[in-house]
Image: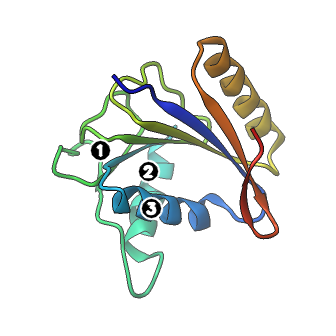
C-alpha cells in the first residue's frame, strides 16, 4: 500500500487561478485523476467556469459535484469522499481532509499574502506531521517552484 505524500504550495507570485490548471495538467499527464476540494459552493462555481476557459486553446475536462463519477478526470467538490477515485487531492481555501486513503498525493494550495490562510496552512502542516504523514513545502521562487523541505 502506497502512502500519500502531502505537498504544500505557498502561492506568492501567482494566484490559485494561475497555478491550479498547470498542476492539474501535470496530474492528468501522469495518468492520474484529480479531486479538488474547496470550502464553498461559490469557489466551486468559480473554478468550474475557470477550468473550461483558462486558456484560449485548451480546457480541463471536469465535473462539479454532485455528479462526479469515476469517469471524470477532475471533480470539484466541497464534500468529503472521492467520487472519481482520484489519485491526486487538491485542497484549496483551507479545505480539510480526514482520510488520505486511496490518494497518492495531496496538494494544499494557500495564498501567501493572506495571514489567515498562512496560519491555517501551518496548522494543517502540524496535523499531518503529527500524524506521521510525509509532507513537503514548495515555494514560488523567481525561477519557478522551489522545494524547501
67 with respect to 29 (left or right)? left
Q: CA distance from mark 2 to mark 1?
A: 9 Å
Residue 111: % across, % down:
72, 49
Circle 3: element type: helix
Name the residue carrying label 1.
Answer: 65
Name the residue carrying label 3.
Answer: 26
Q: Where is the C terminus found, in terms of image quarters?
A: top right
Q: Residue 132 sits in which quadrant?
A: top right
Q: How many neighbours does mark 1 have within 10 angstroms: few (below 14), some (14-19), or many (20 or more)?
A: some
Name the residue carrying label 2.
Answer: 44
Against 24, is 5 above or below? above
Which circle's residue, 2 or 1, is located before the other in the chain? 2
- Mark 2 and mark 1 in contact? Answer it, CB < 8 Å: yes
Residue 87: % across, % down:
35, 40
Residue extending farthest to the front is 1
Q: Which mark is residue 119?
A: none
Q: Residue at (25%, 37%) from the top-left corner? A: 85
Which circle's residue, 1 or 3, is located before the other in the chain? 3
Q: Residue at (36%, 74%) from the top-left corner? A: 59
Q: CA distance from mark 1 to mark 3?
A: 22 Å
Q: Where is the N terminus found, in terms of image quarters?
A: top left
Amino acid at each position: 500500500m502506497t502512502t500519500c505524500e502531502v505537498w504544500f504550495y505557498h502561492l506568492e507570485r501567482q494566484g490559485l487561478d494561475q497555478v491550479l490548471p498547470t498542476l492539474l495538467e501535470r496530474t492528468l499527464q501522469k495518468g492520474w485523476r484529480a479531486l479538488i476540494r474547496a470550502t464553498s459552493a461559490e469557489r466551486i462555481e468559480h473554478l468550474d467556469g475557470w477550468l473550461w476557459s483558462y486558456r484560449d486553446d485548451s480546457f480541463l475536462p471536469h465535473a462539479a459535484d454532485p455528479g462526479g463519477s469515476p469517469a471524470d478526470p477532475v471533480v470539484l467538490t466541497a464534500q468529503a469522499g472521492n467520487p472519481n477515485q482520484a489519485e491526486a487531492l487538491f485542497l484549496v481555501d483551507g479545505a480539510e481532509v480526514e482520510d488520505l486513503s486511496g490518494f497518492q498525493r495531496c496538494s494544499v494550495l494557500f495564498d501567501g499574502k493572506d495571514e489567515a490562510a498562512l496560519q491555517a496552512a501551518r496548522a494543517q502542516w502540524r496535523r499531518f506531521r503529527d500524524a506521521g504523514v510525509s509532507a513537503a513545502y514548495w515555494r514560488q521562487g523567481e525561477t519557478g517552484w522551489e522545494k524547501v523541505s
